[in-house]
Amino acid sequence: MEMAKKFLILKTIIKLMESSKSLHTKTAHVTLLIALPCEGGKGRKMREISGLSKMLEPGYYLNMFEVILLSDEAEFMTIERSQYPSLEELRKEVEFVNKKVYLYAPVKSSKVFGYGKDMDWLSSKGFEKEIVKFVKEPRLTGRLILDGVIEKANKYGYHPIEEREKGRPILFNKNEYEETSDGNVRVYRSYDIRVVFLKDVTSNKLKFYLIVDLRHLLRDKNSGKPLNFREIVCQYGSETLKEIRVIQKDLIRIGERQFKANLEASRQRLLEDIVPFVRKIGRFILPCGTEAVIGETPCRVVVVI
């Protein structure tokens, strides 16, 4: 496939941000990374990631990665939504009998979909088997991708936490943190993930993308209590806050108690934090049994004037 076919037209991105088809939010926040040309017309050299030195060509990039499904369809258990207006009781029963079953009713869909290793158990609840094409149920497919990513991330110590933004999962690793020099605050690196689906303007086909935002969760070292900037300044002083902002890549230390804004913060977060996380996920299995692969190169935007 030609590289140009992997690019997203800027108009599409603007439309996405105005009226997103994101699964978990009406407005999809994406980070725009601008790679400027350097001498010789080549792109800015990316930092080494996983031992590989890459070149990022000049252009606009997003913290959005294409997800490729290795099959067009899968088998599900389905039933009319009217039979289960609420899934709460059924989910409780699934948990009680200790079955590996997922239940999902996409917005605007007339059906409830069941999937997972023990999905045949749902036949006792009136569900029937049905072959479903992923592009025909994009919201279901997005949910499958999200569940698959979360399950793969679990293997690396990342788990969803209770702190959620508009229903989106935030993956958190309790062992992945940096600590301020005064020993008072821990800065945890976490990832806010969601899935969007867009129609490719060159092929006219529906494609799925994983958007990954870097989040830094601040915790008191001793109590584990969440902290905000105001609380940190009040309890530990402004120097501790500045050190936290260095860890977050917002500031650069240029001398003793001297700092300046980091103008390459977005680039560094994408290439040093987000891309390595996406590479860890790499190839994974959806809960319905289908294999999927996340492209490790962030999506590039072609500006059409």
Image (spheres, rainbow, N blue to C red):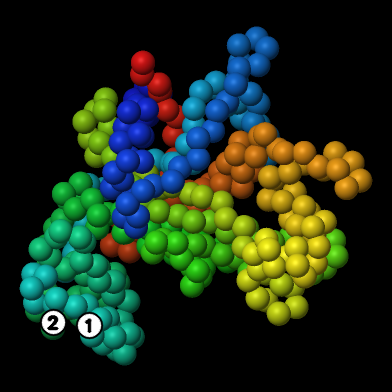
Q: Quadrant of residue 238?
A: bottom right
Image quarter for residue 3?
A: top left
Toward the viewer: 1 or 22?
A: 22
Return the x and y of residue 70 as percentages of the image width and height.
31, 46
| Residue 217: image location, x then y, percent | 62, 63
Q: Is residue 15 left or right of residue 56?
A: left
Identify residue type, mark 2: Lys
The answer to whether 296 is drawn above or below residue 106 in the figure is above
Percent x, y of residue 256: 91, 46
Q: Which residue is mark 1?
A: 90
> Residue sitting at 61 percent across and 36 percent down?
267
Cα distance, mark 1 to mark 2?
9 Å
Q: Secondary structure at mark 2?
A: helix
Amino acid, disc 1: Leu
Q: Say left or right for 50 vs 10.
A: right
Whether residue 96 sits left or right of residue 227 in the image: it is: left
Residue sitting at x 25%, y 54%: 139
Q: Which residue is mark 2?
A: 125
Marks 1 and 2 in Cβ contact (< 8 Å) = yes
The dot on residue 184 is: none
User: Who's the residue at 32% across and 76% down the image?
Assistant: 100
* Disc 1 residue crowd, few under 14, some 14–19, many 20+, Cα 10 Å: some
